[in-house]
Amino acid sequence: MKKSLLFLLFGLMAIVLMACGGGDDDASGDAEETAVVGDDIEDATEITLWTFVGQHMDLYSDAAERWNEENPDKPIKLNAETYPFEQMHNNLLLAVQSGQGGPDIADIEIGQFSNFLQGDVQLEPMNEYVEPVLENAVSSRFENYAQDGNYYGLPTHVGATVMYYNTEIMDEAGVDIDSITTWDDFVAAGEQVVANTDSVMWNVGTEDWLMDMWPMISQQGSDAFDENGEVILDNETNVATLQFLQDAIYENEIAELTPGGMNQSEEFYGYFSEGGSASILAPLWYMGRFLDNMPDLEGKIAIRPLPAWEEGGDRSAGMGGTGTVVTKQSENTELAKEFLAYAKLSEEGNIALWTELGFDPPRWDTWESEEVRADNKYYQYFGDGIFDMLLEVREEINPLNFTANTPDIISEYHTNVTQNVLRTDSQTPEEALKAAADVVRDQQAE
C-alpha cells in the first residue's frame, strides 16, 4: 500500500473513532479482560500493557508481582488489558502513528509486526537488553522482530516445529519412529502405516500454511519472500515442496486432506483422537491443543524432530509468535523497557514462559534448569524428552521474512493454491505458485 494511502487510511480511522466517542486518552475501546498488579503500593509508577491473548496476562501479572518484591525502590502498577486480535492491532497501529492513546508495552502478533516497522518506527529499540542474551538464545527468533540492526520485539517462544507421532499406531505398523530421519524415511514409514493399520500416516492442510508448507520450506532456507522483501513463493524449492505434499496424497497415498482444513479445528481433533492418522506436524506450542482437545491420547504421543530433507539437514523451523514492544509514547520508557526485559529476557522470565504458558522459551540456557525439568502436565502427557529434543535442534531454526504482504501470501495459498493443487488436483504446483506469486507481486506494485 502506498504511503499516502496508508496515512489516508489512518486519518479516516481516526475520524471514525472520534465520531464514535473515543476519548483523548484511550484509543482502545473496551477491554475483554483487565489485570492490575501493584495498585496497593504507594507511589508505584503505572505501566500500561495491551495484549490480544488473555493467557499472556498470567505471565505479565506474575512478572509484576516478582518485580515489585525485588525492586521496592521502583515499584510499578501494571495495568494490563486484553482486546480482540484485530481490534488491538488496528488500534495500536493507529495509536503509534497518531502519537496518541497507545500503551507503554504491547504484544504484536508476528504476522502483523512488519506493519509497525514502516516509515519512522514508533517502537523503542531493546538492543541493550537483547544483545547480551543472544549467545544463549535461539537468535533467529529475535531477528523476526528486528530491522536495521535494532531489536524492537521480544519473542514469546521459539515455536520449534516438530513431529507428533501416535505411538500406538506406529507400533502396530511396525515402525520405529527413531528410524525416521529424512522425509524419504517418512514416506517409507507412511507406506507401512497404510499397509498395516486402518490409519493414514499424515494430513495435509488446505488452510494450514503455518502447519506444513511454511515450516517445510523454512527447513530448506526458503520462504515466501527473500530478505529484501521480494516475492520468491514460486522458486524451485517451494515448487518441489508443494509437489511433495501433492504426492503424499495422490502418488504415495500416505496422507489425506486435513479434516476441517487445519489441524486446529474441532473436526480434526475428533478425527485424530479416533486414530484417523498417525502424525501431526506442528510447533511445540501445539502441545496445549493435545491437552485441551485430545486428552484421551495422554501417554500415546511422542515428540520427535521434523524429518530432514537430506542427511544432516535442518530438522525444525520456528513458527508463530508474538513480539512484545515498548512504544515511543511511553512516559516511563526506561522503566517500561527494564520491566519488559525482566519479564521476557531474564532467566526467571524464560522459565515462567514454560511454567506459566507451556511455551518453549527463547533462552536455551534455561532448558536444563531444575524448574523447567520439574514434572508437570506436559511431561505427564508427552514424556520427559521434550527439551532434550529441543537442545538437538536449537541451531537448526532459520529466521522468517515478513512483509506487509505476508497476509496476502497466506490468503492466496489458502484460497487458490491448496484448492487447485491439493483439493482438486487441477493445477501443477509450479502453475499454482506462479499465479499466486504474480498476484502478490502486483499488489506490491500498487
Image (cartoon, rainbow, N blue to C red):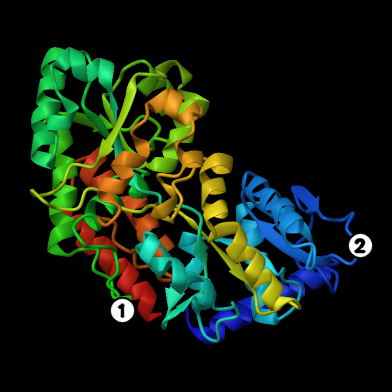
Q: Is residue 417 visible?
A: no
Task: Compute the Cα span from label 2 to label 1.
Answer: 50 Å
Q: Residues within 10 Å of mark 2 (few under 14, many from 20)?
A: few
Of 101 and 393, the residue lying toward us = 393
- Per the image, label 2 sits on a secondary structure element best described as loop
Kind of residue at badge 1: Asn
- Place of residue 21 in the rendered image (x, y in percent of width and height, measured from the top left): 86, 67
**Vertical arrangement, residue 211 with respect to residue 329, above or below:** above
Residue drawn at 13 percent across, 49 percent down? 309
Kind of residue at badge 2: Glu
The answer to which quarter of the image holds residue 192 is top left
Q: Which residue is mark 2?
A: 42
Report whether 335 appears left or right of 252: right
Image quarter in which the C terminus is found: bottom left
The answer to which quarter of the image holds residue 93 is bottom right
Residue drawn at 37 percent across, 76 percent down? 444
Report whether 278 appears left or right of 326: left
Of 359 and 441, the residue lying toward us = 359
Q: Is residue 303 visible?
A: yes
- Place of residue 282 in the rendered image (x, y in percent of width and height, measured from the top left): 35, 41
Q: Nearer the viewer, mark 2 or mark 1?
A: 2
**Vertical arrangement, residue 214 with respect to residue 15, above or below:** above
Q: Which residue is mark 1?
A: 228
Residue drawn at 31 percent across, 67 percent down? 439
- Per the image, label 1 sits on a secondary structure element best described as loop
- Place of residue 83 in the rendered image (x, y in percent of width and height, measured from the top left): 69, 53
